[in-house]
Image: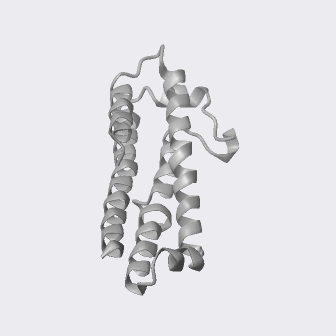
Amino acid sequence: ADPSHDALEAEIMNNLLHVTPENAAELSYKMMGINGVPIETRWHAAEAFISCDNLLSDLCDDEELQGRLSDLFLTRYIESNGRETHGIGWKIWECLGVGPNTGYMPTEESFMLIQKKEVQEELMKLYKIVFENDRIVSGELEKCLLTMKR
């Protein structure tokens, strides 16, 4: 919920609207660097949260609330439903030809791909989903915390 998240989202969108041959390499590296954070951190945080019974029970003893929190992290960050952050991160990499075969680093192909309007539009769409997931998780966590305080 930090305002810097909205600023980063706006910066990403602005960058993708202004790709040039001169900045294509820089922006490819930037998009990969930014993508590396949510794809890994959200997965591991969610995995730790939902697989650690003690963590949930330490937070609260309300089983319904524990279920809501577990489902929230699973569906927004891990579960393969097409809109979870981990899967979206892989799609971002795929848009620029990045993956295990490139060491998760951009290549000359990436520099060419990011200059394509359809790739830019797809990246904007995908990054919006990542930020939307974080806003949803943040909002739901806030509701759960309020429930716990009662």
The vertical placement of 6 against 138, above or below, is above
Residue 97 in the figure: left or right of residue 12? right
The vertical placement of 5 against 15, above or below, is below
Q: Which residue lies at the image location 34% right of the left edge and 70% below the top edge?
A: 144
Q: Which of the 4 quarters of the picture holds residue 33?
A: top right
The vertical placement of 8 against 99, above or below, is above
Q: Which of the 4 quarters of the picture holds residue 108?
A: top right
Residue at the front extreme, as displayed: 150
Q: Which of the 4 quarters of the picture holds residue 145?
A: bottom left
**Is any part of residue 93 visible from this angle?**
no
Spot occupied by residue 59 in the image (x, y as percentages of width and height): 48, 74
Spot occupied by residue 148 in the image (x, y as percentages of width and height): 36, 74
The colour mode here is one colour
Q: Which residue lies at the image location 33% right of the left edge and 65% below the top edge?
A: 140
Q: Which residue lies at the image location 53% right of the left edge and 26% below the top edge?
A: 111
Seen from the viewer's position, the closer of residues 147 and 13 is 147
Q: Which residue lies at the image location 34% right of the left edge and 72% below the top edge?
A: 149
**Is any part of residue 105 visible from this angle?**
yes
Residue at the top extreme, as displayed: 22
How many labels sit on residues?
A: 0
Question: Which quarter of the figure is the C terminus placed in?
Answer: bottom left
Spot occupied by residue 65 in the image (x, y as percentages of width and height): 38, 79
Residue 74 in the figure: left or right of residue 68? right
Spot occupied by residue 72 in the image (x, y as percentages of width and height): 40, 69
Seen from the viewer's position, the closer of residues 15 and 98 is 15
